[in-house]
Every structure is written in C-alpha cells, then in structure tokens.
Amino acid sequence: MVTLDHLRATYFEEAAELLERAYAELAALSEGRAGEDTVHALFRAYHSIKGGGGAFGFTRPVGLAHVMETLLDLVREDRITVAPDLLALLLRGTDMLADLLAAERDGVAATPGVEAGILDALESAAKIDHIAREQAAPVQAAAAIADGWRIEFRPHPGLFRSANEPLHILRELAGLGPVEVVADPSRLPGINRIDPEEAYLSWTVTLRAAVARAQVQDVFEFVIDDCDLSIDALDDATEPAATMAERPVATPTAEPAPPDIAAAPNASPLAQSVRVDVAKIDRLVNLVGELVITQAMLAQHEATLPPDLCPGLTRGLETLSQHLRELQDGVMAIRTQPVRTVFSRMPRLVREVAGMLGKDVRLVVTGEGTEIDKTVVEQLADPLTHLLRNALDHGIEPPDAREALGKPRQGIIQLSAEQRGGRIIIEITDDGRGIDRARVLARARERGLVSAEATLSESEIDELIFLPGFSTAETVSAVSGRGVGMDVVRRNIEALGGRIRLESRLGHGSRFTLTLPLTLAVLDGLVVSVGRDAYILPIAAIVESLRPRREDVRDVVGHGQVIAIRGSYVPLVPLHTRFGVAGAVNDYTRGIVVIVETDHSGQIGLLVDDLVGQQQVVVKSLEANWRRVDGIGGATILGDGRVALILDVAGLAALPAVAIPAAPPRAHLHLH
Amino acid sequence: MAKRVMTVDDSRTMREMVAFTLRQAGYEVSEAEDGVKALAALKAAPVDVVITDLNMPNMDGVTLIRQLRAEPRYRSVPILMLTTEGDAAKKAEGKGAGATGWLVKPFDPAKLIDVVKRVAG
C-alpha cells in the first residue's frame, strides 16, 4: 500500500539518484567528456528535485534547485558558458543541495541561511537580479462573490482540437450549484456540411450559487483561449458586469513535422523494474536457505538407501539440487546492488578533504556498476571513507612538494571495483608518497609492537599499520585522526567475510585491495568432522589437504607444532584442542591436515578427523543467535539437522595457540 | 469501468504521486518514464487520459503531445501537461501542440482529481 511516507521515501531515494547523476554529469563536464545530453540531464536532475520537493513543501532545497535549474537553462540556451568557476559553483551548489535534502529527510532544520552564500553566487553567475520564486499567479478581482452568475460560453470552432469537451465543462459548472442551461444551435450548418471535429454549439448558463468568480473562471481555465466567454454577476449590485475581453483565436501555426521516432529503441510498454521491500527479499533468501537444508537432508537419506533402489528418486534429487542452485543464484541476484550507491559519495568527500588539506586531487572512479550484496554495499561506506581520507592525508603530497619531486601537482586517487570469480575486488590506489617502511618499523619498535631484533619482510612491515593503535602521522590531524582505525577498517572488512591487502612503493604510492564475497548469505564449504562435531571450512580459503607423515610434524618451542610442506613450515592448529572437543583424532598421522590460506598470517594447517564433503551452506549469524566467538564466522544447519560452526580462518590464525575452553553450549543454540 | 490514465514523467516521485492520487480516486493508472516509452505503451494499449511532464529525456512532453495528436485514436483523448511555475512559453507551446489542459507543479491532490474529471468527465 502506497502511503505518503512511502512517497516521501521514494522522493528521497530518487533525489539521491538524481544527485548522483548530477555529480556524474558535472564530472563529465569537468573532464571534457560532456556529451550532447550532459547539460540537459543536469538540468533535468535539478528540475526533478525541485518538482518533487515542491510537493512536500521542502522550500529550501526547492529554492536552491530552482536557481541551479535556471543557471543550467541559461547554459542550455548558450547564454552562459561552462567555465571551471561555474563548475566549481555547481558542485558546491549540488553539495549544499544534498545537505538541505538530507536535513529534510532526517527532519532536522538545516542552519538558517546556510545556503545564502551559494545562492548569491549562483544568482550572480546567472546574472539574475532576482529570481522569481514559485508563486501562485495573482488573481484579479477573482475573489468577488455574487449570488449567482450568468455565463455565456461560445466555443471557437477549433475547441475540440485540444480534446476539450464542453459537456464536461457544463457538468463541472453544475457541480457548483443549480444551473439552467440554454443551448444556442444557431451556428449549426446544414447536416451535409457538418464537420464532426468542429464546435458549433454555444451555451448560456445561469448558475444560482453564491460562489466566487474565480471558481467559475477556473472551470474554463483550459478553454479560455478557445472560446468567447462572459461571466456576469446575476445581482448587479454585488459586482458590476465584467466581461472577459474577446481573445483572438490561438491558431496553431504550421506544426513542425514530427521527429522520426522509428529509430527509437523498441521500448517495452511495461515497467522495467519493480520496487520491493528488502524484508521481503530477505524472507525469500531465508526460505531458499531452508530449502537448501531440506535438500541436503533428502540427499543424505537417499545416500543411505541401497543403490538402484529407486533410480527415479536419485535423478529427481539431482534435478532438484540443480534447480535449487539456480533459484538461489536468482534470489541472491535480487539482493545485489551496484557499488555506485556508496562510490557516489566519495567524490564529494575527496573534494572537501582535499580542500581542507590544501591538496589538489582528482578522484577517478571505475566499475561503479559492479554489483554486490546490499548489506556489503552499506557496510562499505565507513572503510572506504577511512581509506580515502588516509590516502588524501598521508598519501598524496601537497602540490608544491609534488612539483619538487617531479610529479604533477595534481594527485590522483583511483577507486575501482570489479568482479573476479565469486568475489568483488575494490581497490584504492594513490600516487602519493607510499609507505615509508623504515618509519613504520621504527614507530612499531618505539611502541613495543615489534622487538628490536626482529627482522621483518616488507609485507610483514606493511601488516603493522593494521595493528590497533598504530600511527605514523607526525601530527594528529583532524582529517584522519590518530591512525586508530586501520585496525577497525580491517575488522570491518573481515566481518563482511572480506580481506584487505596493502601494496606500496615508497615515493610512488599505495594500493589497498579489498576482496569481498558476492553475498554473505551462502557459502561454499567443506564439511569436516572433529570428534562428534562437524565444522565448515570456506572452500575459498582451502589450499590443500593431506595426511602428514610422522616426520613432517615438528615441535617449535613457544610456537606449538609446525608441519613441513615442500620445504616451508606451516603452523598447525589442532581444531579439537582449539574448541575443546573430546574424542577427536589426536594423532596427526591418523587425521587430516587441511592447509588454509589467510590474508595476513599466511598459511596454517588445521587438524581434523576427516573430510565429510563439499556443500553449499546457508550462513546464520552466530552473533544474532548467540554471541560472537573468535575463530567462528557463523553457523549453519546440516542436512541431518545438526548445527555446524563455520570457521573463520583468519580469526583462527590470529588466535593465540591455546585452547578456547568453552565450546558454545549447543543445547541453547537455536538458529533461525 | 474505471477510466485509464497514463502518467508520463521521468521523475519516479512525480509518477508515484500522480498514480497514488488517481488510484485513490478510482482511476486505473499506468506509468511511463519518457515520451518514447509512453508512445509505445499508448499505441499498444489505449488510455482515456494522458498526463505528461514536459521536460523529459529521449522525447519531451510537447513532442509526445504532437505525436499523439497525429494518431487518429488519440485525436480526442485529453492530454494534460505538468508544468512548473506556470511557465507561460512552455504552456503555450504545449497548448499549440494540442494539450487539453495543464497542471502546475507542485499540485494539490484534490486539484489533480478535479482537473482530470474536468477533461475526462
């Protein structure tokens, strides 16, 4: 059901899209990529923001949008040209428009007069002394009320050409009060000469109702140019007879030939998209999840039957599984959203922060159409903001410094997104000073994060900046703060099932690469058994699995055990000790070691009893159902109804090599 | 039978507002986001009233009105144009192209219903 709140929400959603569009078109203008429609599209963006906003009484954004629209109209008519000054002004105006709209959306009053400066600047750019704000047309003597009216209505022959219908007009008059209608057929020609598309009849209407002249006039609003009309008060004492002057017929001049629309694309007459509540989609996702579990359960039962007992059942289950996977993909696709929604906020951020820091920076955004789970998109805003601020503050040098280094004065930050396989890669690259590893290492030693003797590889040093509380900024700046936050950024990304990696070259810049899953709801997992429990390992993290020989495993003092694999040593984590599982295989040579890759801790080997099989699992949040457990990314329900925990490999690798005493009390864990 | 109205506007907000208001008043409403799509849809399935914005991508409102008036089926179908701030020149242009009437944005829902009634009966 559509409600006014819903309409408001639609407006703000649309306004956000229009602002995004406006930013994109402005960027096109400033980069000289402007197409034929750029200015028009820009005009329409402000125009639509204004049009919709007016309906909700958002006077301030509407006022600003109106001035910007006027300015664009002048550009459209080639009366002013788009100079860099004007572009900057339009950008500022758009920023302000976004602020004013956000204030309306959140129901907070924007600071009074905050837009006055930009309004003045825009108006003077448009060389407009005064821009008429929307006003109702003044009504002359229209308020006069009489006891009744005598109306002479004589349509011009061409009245029908605009599809106006005198009958509807007479009916509307009758709606105002009792009427007497006298038709005048004197202009009717002989029956042979009647043109059915011409108006011949005239009417005299006596309306006996005390209504305002304006109300009567209003009925004739659309035909006033296509008729002779007089409206006289019945009671002459109330108002002297006022006759509407006869107006010349508005003869349409020769109509320009209709443009050729044959070339227009085959537009479907049906709507191209529907708007659906996210809650409804989530319900679908959940149901599909339940179906996947049921299917797994059926498959498991089927596997216990003697082979060839019922080939039809086996085939049916296979088809079911295949269709289910397609259904799942389809439903997940509904949940995805282009990263544009979050990317589009970044140009403004870069502009503002660069301005504050006195730096000259261009942000180049690519791949904004890349689609990713809606939840992920929403959670990306903070980490991206943080990384961009860092790049601006610590990466890009001030223009003079850049020049001295032989770099262009303008720094470039690239923000890109692309899909690679089942993952989304987002990169933030700057051409700034890069990470000064000597300084990072010195700072880490100073803080006691690294022992003085330790020798670290370049990538190990890069890892240091992700440690909590680490900062190399000489001065604490208002922009990126104390450098607390890179650890938070990493945590946020990992909470999304993603990874973050840093590459850097001193003097040449840095690149942060975020690798994110397409969706958070389903995971391709390997089911492993440990004692009587089952765990899920994300397939994406698995490198290989093997049964070690006795001589492959060694004890390292203070570091537990390692396994030798083709000459390098990988730390071993026996899952049963980690999670306190009784009755599990203790001997490496009788169990299986699964080697998994983690982002910042390299590879680790997990000792499990056995590999059960590969399965797509529906991820249920452990936090939402119980509480957060380090080393566990979530839980799922297996085909046999058992709850299995999904391992968070990065979390496991980061854990100290001691056992976690308490496994979650399974009796209390009900997933939904 | 409920009268059928098509609202043509590139602004989703405006379309939804027109549709919402008229549906409440018992009309059957379809939507199109520009002149090209409206024309295709209108040729495929006739309506009783067309309400169109003037400023739209691909095909603007005035062109749409002209194109519709050139179709025998739409010669006497009322077409209302939505204008902002009572732009006299645009209004005259629309009127010249064959628009039946107009409505100034932002509009009062009651006014919209009145105007549709006025032209469609």
Image (cartoon, rainbow, N blue to C red):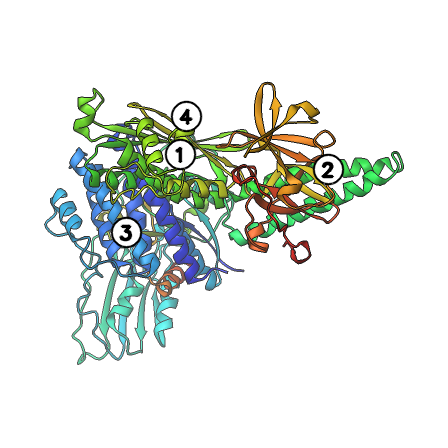
Say whether residue A375 is left or right of residue A18: right
Q: Nearer the viewer, mark 3 or mark 2?
A: 2
Say whether residue A488 is left or right of residue A495: left
Q: Chain of mark 2?
A: A
- Calculate the distance from the C-alpha at mark 1 to the C-alpha at mark 3: 45 Å
- Calculate the distance from the C-alpha at mark 1 to the C-alpha at mark 4: 9 Å
Q: Where A529 sits versus A431, above or below? A: below
Q: Nearer the viewer, mark 1 or mark 3?
A: 1
Q: Mark 3 or mark 2: which comes first in sequence? A: 3
Residue picked out by circle 1: A450
- Calculate the distance from the C-alpha at mark 3 to the C-alpha at mark 2: 61 Å
Q: Mark 1 or mark 3: which comes first in sequence? A: 3
Specify the amino acid type for callout 4: Thr
- Calculate the distance from the C-alpha at mark 1 to the C-alpha at mark 2: 36 Å
Residue A163 in picture, x, y percent from top left: 38, 53
Residue picked out by circle 4: A455
Per the rendering, the mark at residue A585 is 2
Mark 3 surroundings: few (<14), some (14-19) or many (≥20) residues within 10 A? some
Specify the amino acid type for callout 2: Val
Per the rendering, the mark at residue A99 is 3
* Residue at left offset 27%, top offset 61%: A109
